[in-house]
Amino acid sequence: MTATSEHLLYKAAVSFMVSERTCVESWELVAKFASRFTDNGDVAALKKEFAVVEQQIKADFKIDALPSAWRSAKSVAVKAVKSAVRLVDSHTGAVKGKTAVENECKPVGVPTAPAATPEDKFFAALSDATHTVKAKGFEFSDEAIKQAAVESVTKLLAHVKGTKVK
């Protein structure tokens, strides 16, 4: 690796670390502000506050839209106020994570997607691999090797599914 690429990669890695931390801190600021509206549930007032800030930022920085992370944080905060979900833990005073708040906003009784089983993950990976091979136009040079590969995969799939293959 060259000195230039090492410097660029180092700078990139540090930027990603700063970005990640800044995103967390930014969510905490949005959540703390929006938590003022949780008790009264005044979603309209909260949306108005967001709109005023967005207009000012757009004018100051001459941009048309704020970053997706901002829009996501705003959306979660508004949903929390609509759902009367607390953004700040009443016992510890700590801001709840954005994902935790999103999960609390989901209506009770609405089924969530089941976690992928190891078999589901295997079949998804196999499907991806199959599509990749086809997309790259890969062909076996020897028909016997191709047949052996097909038989091996068939047996493996049958084993994973719990069926027997002859």
Image: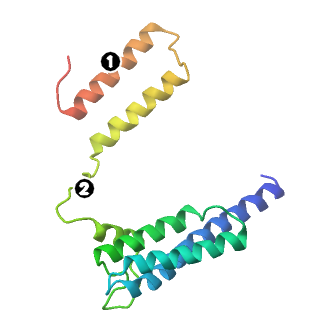
* Kind of residue sitting beneath label 2: Thr
Q: Is residue 49 above or below residue 69?
A: below
The answer to whether 5 is drawn above or below residue 18 in the figure is above
Secondary structure beneath disc 2? loop
Q: Nearer the viewer, residue 12 or 139?
A: 12
Q: Nearer the viewer, residue 68 or 12?
A: 68
Callout 2: 10 Å neighbours few (<14), some, many (20+)? few
Could you tell whether 38 is left or right of 32 in the image?
Answer: left
Q: Residue 30: image x %, image y %? A: 49, 79
Give above or below for 147 relative to 159.
above
Q: Quadrant of the C terminus?
A: top left
Which label belongs to residue 108?
A: none
Q: Nearer the viewer, mark 1 or mark 2?
A: 2
Rendered image quadrant of residue 15: bottom right
Q: Which mark is residue 112?
A: 2
Please identify the quarter of the rendering in which residue 160 is found: top left
Which amino acid, mark 1? Answer: Glu
Query: Measuring 34% from the left and 83% from the top, which residue is drawn there?
Result: 38
Residue visible at 36% across and 18% down in the picture: 150
Label 1 vs label 2: CA separation? Answer: 37 Å
Image side of residue 76 versus residue 157, left or right: right
Q: Which residue is mark 1?
A: 151
Q: Residues within 10 Å of mark 1 (few under 14, many from 20)?
A: some
If you read the primary sequence from the N terminus, does the residue marked by circle 1 or circle 2 appear first?
Answer: 2
Asked if residue 45 is positioned above or below residue 13 in the image, the reply reads below
Q: Position of residue 100 (x, y in %)?
A: 35, 71
- Mark 1 lies on a secondary structure that is helix
Instruction: Determine which quarter of the picture holds residue 34.
Output: bottom left
Along the viewing direction, whichever of 68 and 82 lies nearer the viewer: 82
Q: Residue furthest top?
A: 143
Please say which color scheme the image uses: rainbow
Give residue 26's position: percent from left, percent from top: 54, 77
